[in-house]
Amino acid sequence: MPRPVEDRQIQPRAAALERGPASTRVSRRNFVLGAAAGLSALAVATPWPARAAGAARAVADSGARVIAETRLTPTMLDLTVDSPALAATAMVRLLHPADWTPGSARTWPVLYLLHGAGDDYTSWTRSTDVATFTRGAEMLVVMPSGGRDGFYSDWFNRGAGGPPAWETFHLTELRQILERGYGAGTVRSIAGLSMGGLGAMSYAGRHPGMFAAAAAYSGVVHTTYQAARGTSLIQGVLVKDGYDPTALWGDPNLNANVWAAHNPYDLAPNLTGIPLYLACGNGTPGVLDPPGTPPDLFIEPLCAEMNTAFARRLREVGATVTADFYGPGTHNWPWWQRSLHQSLPLLTRPLRLGG
């Protein structure tokens, strides 16, 4: 079967996942809405031979490895990873403490931030103040590529598996690379917006014990909500961007078990024992939306219903969940920045940050 459009784009060049200006990406996407803030720093690419000696050990069991580094600021570093799981390269952005030294014996706890559909690994630093807001925190903030519409999954591909295997890339290849060469410890939290909210809750539910806390902002947290309402949202996004809608998790009816295995709602029993955070608006423009923002009549209202059902299910199974269903608010970056600010204590408390 031909590889999906996005996967053919992930060729071995540092920026292959992120073609096109930010303004073009924003205008095309329906899932993730935001304005590009840009990055006013001189990027200096560092080829493999010039890297720290300790980082040379940063090779995953699969052979995945970093083939280039790009220094953006004194505490921001981009990695280009050659990934067998993706059969391509992918980008990862790191925020690190000022005293961070790759390859040293010291380790730091990790916060993963996952982006939404139609966006990329630059989105969190482009559209929020995460770089300044977390400055001084003794942790690594990891913002990996998740594909235009990768949905944080190893794709089913009609039962054949194979690339793109985003879950394997993130939780095996990238994790091993960061732990072996970039000072990542084994205590982690995870958060994401929209599609990334699905990823955060799905990863935490599919891998109990891997994450100490999880948060979803306007997350797609019930992929089979009211049957076709949920599944058509996922498949509609895939079709819009040129993918086979059954390549991700198969047919919603014939492969219902595969859908359930990646659905945060169905994974709720696995999410007990860690603090969880859910945030969502209702689609009506609120105080953080720019003047003239039209009502969101589809994405955010549906996410609000999904999150309400998910929070109810989490409480039924005894999970600890903080729900901020703040009413007016669209599917937009000001709200996700607000949610990051409000949930960061919950996400970082289990990390026991020093300094």
Image (cartoon, helix red, strand yellow):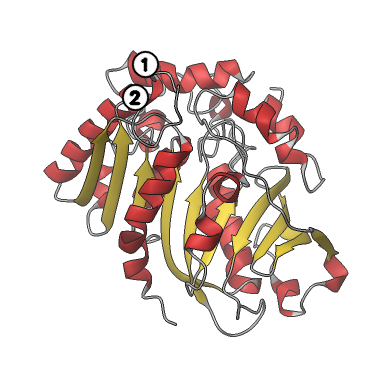
Tell which residue pokes out farthest to the bottom in this image.
105
Residue that numbered label 1 is attached to: 297
Above or below, 344 against 259 in this view is below
Above or below, 121 against 262 in this view is below
Residue that numbered label 2 is attached to: 283
Residue at the image point whose x is 71% and y is 54% from the top: 40
Residue 194 relative to residue 260: left or right: right
Q: Quadrant of the N terminus?
A: top right
Residue at the image point whose x is 41% and y is 23% from the top: 255
Measured as percent of width and height from the top left, residue 51 is found at 80, 72
Measured as percent of width and height from the top left, residue 168 is found at 56, 49
Residue at the image point whose x is 47% and y is 39% from the top: 333
Measured as percent of width and height from the top left, residue 58 is found at 69, 69
Q: Is residue 224 visible?
A: no
Residue 36 relative to residue 330: left or right: right
Measured as percent of width and height from the top left, residue 313 is found at 18, 38
Residue 346 relative to residue 119: left or right: left
Under circle 1, the secondary element is loop
- The residue lying toward the viewer, choosing from 190 and 36, is 36
- The residue lying toward the viewer, choosing from 140 and 62, is 140
Residue 355 relative to residue 64: left or right: left
Under circle 2, the secondary element is loop
Labels in figure, total: 2
User: Are the residues flagged by discs 1 and 2 in contact, CB closer than 8 Å?
Assistant: yes
Above or below, 213 against 312 in this view is below
Q: How far apart are marks 1 and 2 (CA)?
A: 6 Å
Task: Give the quadrant of residue 9.
Answer: top right
